[in-house]
């Protein structure tokens, strides 16, 4: 028996590998034989979404804190669709989201918007300035530090628009990011993928016979 193929599949990313690996670990032969089925992969994504985002929703209800943010959806997708890509590694996910939060809050402070409610329906020039500054800080800093994570662009936009505008909310977002990373670590490694502990996988090893 061999470990799942550690490569990205056209249109399906790492998902077939994850499904195959989990099927082997759970000794589900029929599921393993159909790991490339779009129906099976779609069902896996549905169940996994319910698990990952559902857990954050439960935490949000129990704590009455905003643990659910729109940008966590695309982060969760990347963590499983392209688990071995640079954008999915813990370093890039955590640092990218942190840069986005800090940039957004700094932009709000620059334009005196920290205490104002969001005004998405009727943008002011100050809000436009905050949005531009937040985006112009987030993207190049991620590149300069070598931690690109595309969903961070949504995060900094959410902050700059005032939907999330306090350091406390930023901290809660980062806790939610850590929870997502922990789930990705457990599921991807259970599937047999060499999901990194921190930095990106530079050269994923080929399948090793067991």
Image (tube, helix red, strand yellow):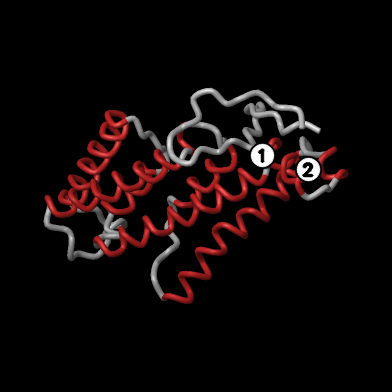
- Compared to residue 147, the image places residue 54 above or below, namely below
- The N terminus, quarter of image: top right
Measured as percent of width and height from the top left, residue 81 is found at 59, 39
Measured as percent of width and height from the top left, residue 46 is found at 67, 53
Q: Which residue is mark 2?
A: 24
Measured as percent of width and height from the top left, residue 106 is found at 18, 50
Q: What residue is at 78 percent from the left and 39 percent from the top? A: 35
**Does residue 151 appear left or right of residue 30 in this picture?**
left
Distance in Å between CA atoms under marks 1 and 2 = 9 Å
Crowd tier of the residue under label 2, counting other residues whose Cα lies within 10 Å: few below 14, some 14–19, many 20 or above = many
**Does residue 98 appear left or right of residue 114 in this picture?**
right
**For the residues bearing labels 1 and 2, Cβ distance under 8 angstroms:** yes
Q: Residue furthest right?
A: 30
Residue 29, numbered circle? none
| Count of number-bearing discs | 2
**Does residue 3 appear left or right of residue 175 in this picture?**
right
């Amino acid at each position: 028996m061999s470990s799942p193929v550690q490569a990205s599949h056209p249109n399906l990313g790492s998902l077939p590998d994850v499904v195959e690996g989990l099927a082997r670990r759970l000794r589900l032969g029929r599921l393993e034989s159909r790991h490339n089925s779009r129906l099976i992969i779609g069902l896996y994504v549905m169940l996994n979404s319910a698990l990952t985002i559902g857990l954050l929703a439960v935490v949000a209800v129990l704590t009455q804190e905003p643990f659910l943010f729109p940008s966590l959806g695309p982060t969760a997708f990347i963590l499983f669709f392209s688990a071995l890509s640079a954008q999915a590694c813990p370093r890039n996910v955590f640092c990218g989201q942190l840069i986005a939060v800090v940039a957004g809050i700094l932009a709000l402070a620059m334009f005196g918007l920290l205490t104002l409610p969001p005004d998405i329906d009727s943008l002011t020039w100050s809000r436009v300035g905050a949005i531009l500054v937040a985006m112009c800080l987030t993207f190049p800093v991620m590149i300069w530090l070598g931690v690109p994570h595309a969903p961070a662009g949504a995060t900094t936009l959410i902050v700059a628009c005032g939907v999330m505008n306090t350091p406390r909310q930023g901290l809660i977002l980062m806790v939610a990011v850590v929870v997502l990373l922990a789930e990705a670590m457990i599921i991807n490694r259970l599937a047999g993928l060499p999901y990194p502990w921190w930095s990106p996988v530079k050269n994923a090893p080929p399948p090793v016979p067991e």
